Structure formats: C-alpha cells, structure tokens
Image: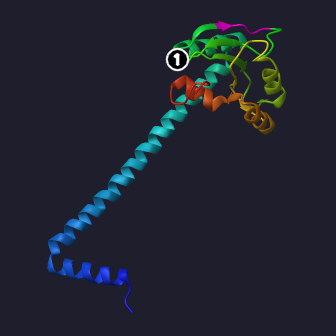
Amino acid sequence: MVSGAAIGVIVLVGILAAHPVLGVLMVIGLLAVVVATVVRSFRRRTEARAVWAARAQHVEAYQSMSPKEFEHALAFLCQRDGCRDVRVVGGSGDLGADVIATVPDGRRLILQAKRYGPNSTVGSGDVQKVNGTYQHAHGGHLAAIVTTSRFTQSARDYAVRVGIRLLDGDALAGWTSRTGPAPWH
C-alpha cells in the first residue's frame, strides 16, 4: 500500500521532471523564505538587545536618585502618560502612598515607591501595608508598588491575591521607555 504522502512526492517529482524551470523557481522561493526568516529573527534580537540596554540605563538612573527624587520621577511618568491631579505625598506617615494620581480613565491610583539597590527585594509586608490603606485611607481604586529592584515570591503571590500591581526594575524601565505598560494598564 502506498501512502498519500508518497503519492504526493511521486506526483511532485513527475511535475518537476517535466518542468525543470519550475523546480529551480521553487528552490529559489524556498531559499528566499529561509533568508527572510533569518533576517527577521536577527532584527528582532537586535531590537530586543537595544530595548534591554535602554531599560538598564533607566534603572541605574533611578537607583542613583534620592527616595524623594524617585517619587517625583514617578509622578512625572504619571503626568507624561495622561494622569491628572498628580501629587507626591510620600514621607513619614504616608500610609503606603507616595504618589496619588487620577489615571486617564478616571480611577484614583495610589503608588508606593521603593527605590532599592539591585540586591534588595520588596517583601510581602510592603504589599500588605499598601493593601491595608490604599482604599480606605486614600480613596484609591487601584494600587501599585514600583521598585528599582525586584519583589519576593511571597510579595508577588500576595499582590496577585489582592489585586495590587507590582512593577519591578524591568517593568519600571519599560514604563519609562514606553516599551512596557504603565501601572494602570
């Protein structure tokens, strides 16, 4: 018994034997597809490297800021991206809010800024503090914690459970460079 694939190959060989120019054109077409795929892949990798290099520069700039400068930088990003009524309110007794803003769709955003070094992490206690205050103490509809470093797994797990958005250093760099979403998206 001869399979359908074998019959297809036999028919294709017969057509190519009768029309050798068609065979040459098919090989050229196949090579063109392979070359285009390789070029596209190379371009994507090059673009991705450029994006990550730009993002790394943004994170380093934020890490060199004072905590107050970092809060103001986040407020600037909110204003740049269409927020209104943006206020920096951080300091002692801020109850988990460093920046308060109204996002473009009208919701009130509470941002907690955590400017940490690359070897520090934001823990679940910080997420719990924001969760306990952003709605009742600040009238927020959504909350986000933005850090120059990263979050512990327990902080990420808890944030998912309670709906608080977390932006680590990479996500912050993406927001800054407009290659990633703002915290309210």
Residue 5 at what x, y percent from top left? 36, 80
Outermost residue, bottom direction?
1
Looking at the picture, the colour scheme in use is: rainbow
What is the magenta range?
87-91
Can you say which quadrant of the picture contains the N terminus? bottom left
Question: For mark 1, does the 10 Å Cα neighbourhood hold few (<14), some (14 to 19), or many (20 or more) residues?
Answer: some
What's the residue at 71%, 10% (across, down)? 68
Residue 56 at what x, y percent from top left? 59, 30
Left or right of residue 165, residue 136 in this image: right
Q: Nearer the viewer, residue 63 or 165?
A: 165
What's the residue at 54%, 33% (across, down)? 53
Q: Mark 1 is on which residue type?
A: Asp
Residue 79 at what x, y percent from top left? 55, 12
Label 1: which residue?
81
Q: Nearer the viewer, residue 93 or 64?
A: 93
In terms of secondary structure, what is the magenta stretch mainly? Answer: loop
